[in-house]
Image: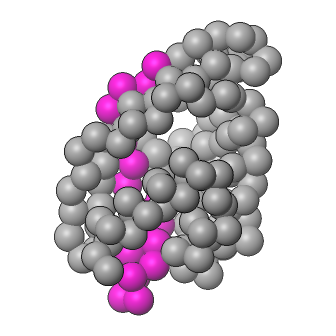
């Protein structure tokens, strides 16, 4: 399976709400939201290790209701995959609606084909505003 196919499977699992299927594709020592600047967004915090990654999904779904998630262009090679996602959501705490267009997702893979590093490149100011923290 290529890294692009792995990312496509991760998104399919995300669409089903199947977090265990996502975790199966991660390295034990995955860095989730690596090299992220400090921010007040609960779901965009750095996590280290597969056992911490469920915290991303818990924070995400506790804070927002996703109304659209569309994966656009996906490109990459054997080590790195980059894709563009359009995301619409409503913040639970404020009711504010957000559209994030071309949010960049960066996936790095190890030699075994598992995700070893992942991060979002998102409009953190907009997302902080949506939850009343910006």
Q: Decide: is 96 above or below 67.
A: above
Instruction: Tell me where residue 88 appears, x and y as whole percent.
Output: 50, 24
Q: Measuring 31% from the left and 48% from the top, which residue is drawn there?
A: 83
Question: Which residue occupies the foreground of this view, 6 or 60?
Answer: 6
- Asked which quadrant contains residue 28, the reply is bottom right
Q: Decide: is 46 above or below 85.
A: below
Residue 94 seen? yes
Is 67 magenta? The answer is no
Farthest residue, direction bottom: 112
Instruction: Tell me where residue 123 appears, x and y as whole percent.
Output: 46, 27
Residue 126 seen? no
Instruction: Tell me where residue 134 appears, x and y as whole percent.
Output: 64, 16
Q: Decide: is 58 above or below 30.
A: above
Q: Measuring 75% from the left and 11% from the top, which residue is drawn there?
A: 94
Question: Which residue occupies the foreground of this view, 74 or 31?
Answer: 74
Q: Measuring 46% from the left and 19% from the top, which residue is drawn there?
A: 99
Answer with left or right where residue 91 lies relative to residue 111. right
- Asked which quadrant contains residue 32, the reply is bottom right
Q: How many marks?
A: 0
Quarter containing the N terminus: bottom left
Magenta-drawn segment? 99-118
Answer with left or right where residue 113 lies relative to residue 10. left
Instruction: Tell me where residue 11 appears, x and y as whole percent.
Output: 46, 54
Answer with left or right where residue 76 lies relative to residue 115. left
């Amino acid at each position: 399976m290529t890294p692009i196919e792995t990312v496509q499977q991760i998104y399919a699992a995300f669409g089903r709400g199947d977090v265990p299927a996502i975790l199966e594709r991660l390295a034990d020592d995955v860095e989730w939201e690596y090299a992220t600047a400090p921010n007040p967004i609960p779901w965009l915090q750095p996590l280290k290790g597969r056992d911490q990654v469920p915290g991303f999904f818990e924070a995400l779904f506790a804070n927002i209701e996703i109304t659209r998630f569309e994966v656009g262009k996906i490109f990459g090679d054997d080590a790195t995959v980059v894709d563009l996602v359009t995301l619409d959501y409503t913040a639970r705490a404020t009711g504010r609606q957000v559209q994030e267009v071309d949010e960049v997702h960066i996936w790095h893979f190890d030699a075994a084909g598992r995700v070893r590093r992942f991060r979002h490149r998102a409009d953190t100011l907009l997302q902080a505003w949506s939850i009343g923290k910006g």
